[in-house]
Image (tube, grey):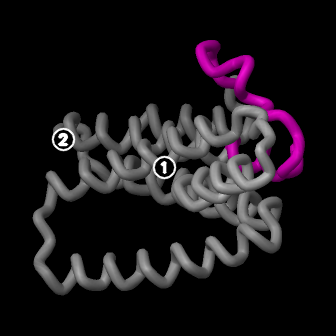
Amino acid sequence: PGMVAGMSRHMKSLRTMQRDHGWIHTLLSEAENERMHLLTFLELRNPGWIFRAFVLLGQGVFFNAFFVTYLISPTICHRFVGFLEEEAVITYTRCLQELDADDAMMKDVLLAVRADEATHRQVNHKLADAGSDAPNPFITREKEERDPPDEKEQDEIDTANKK
């Protein structure tokens, strides 16, 4: 989603010859981060050609469908991705709860990925709220700490860290 949105905004900026208000960088950073998640999990398991073929097929279908939808309504797309990221955080929280404490390396990987997904969730909901013509709400804060988690998120984090 980050690559599609970043590419779409990049092309619009070139086409209209107007600035993007800093969204492209945030979206492409998110895409790079998601790519690293995939590569991290591929290191853990080396899937066969059938799995890789399904990933390729799914990527082709999703990319094009998301691209067309993003052209119609960027707000809906960012909201959808925000909800996907919420589900990812819940999934990683459950995985962490089921992991044995002796497997600290895997737990560390899941903690890092879950934290990234929580950030992506916040970014996409904030971008959906801002509207596609608004300045990037994160651009002045790129080097500062992100907003602290809300009460529900903190409860999830605390619960996961107790296990």
Residue beneath the point at 30% across and 35% down = 108
Image disc number at residue 68: none
Residue that badge 2 annotates:
103
Image coordinates of residue 82 in percent, x first then y, are: 68, 55
Q: Is residue 114 left or right of residue 153?
A: left
Please name the residue that numbered disc 1 is placed on: 31
| Depicted 132 relative to depicted 60: above or below | above
Q: Position of residue 85 (x, y in %)?
A: 59, 55
Q: Position of residue 114 (x, y in %)?
A: 47, 44
Which residue: 49% across, 84% down? 61
The three-letter code of the residue at mark 2 reads Asp
Q: Quadrant of the C terminus?
A: top left
Dots 2, 1 in contact, CB < 8 A: no
In front: 121, or 141? Answer: 141
Residue 72 visible from this viewpoint: yes
Boundaries of the magenta span: 122-146
Q: Local crowd at mark 1 within 10 Å, few (<14), some, or many (≥20)?
A: some
Q: Amino acid at mark 1?
A: Ala
Residue 86 in view: no
- From the viewer's perspective, tell me whether residue 128 is left or right of residue 63: right
Q: Secondary structure at mark 2?
A: loop
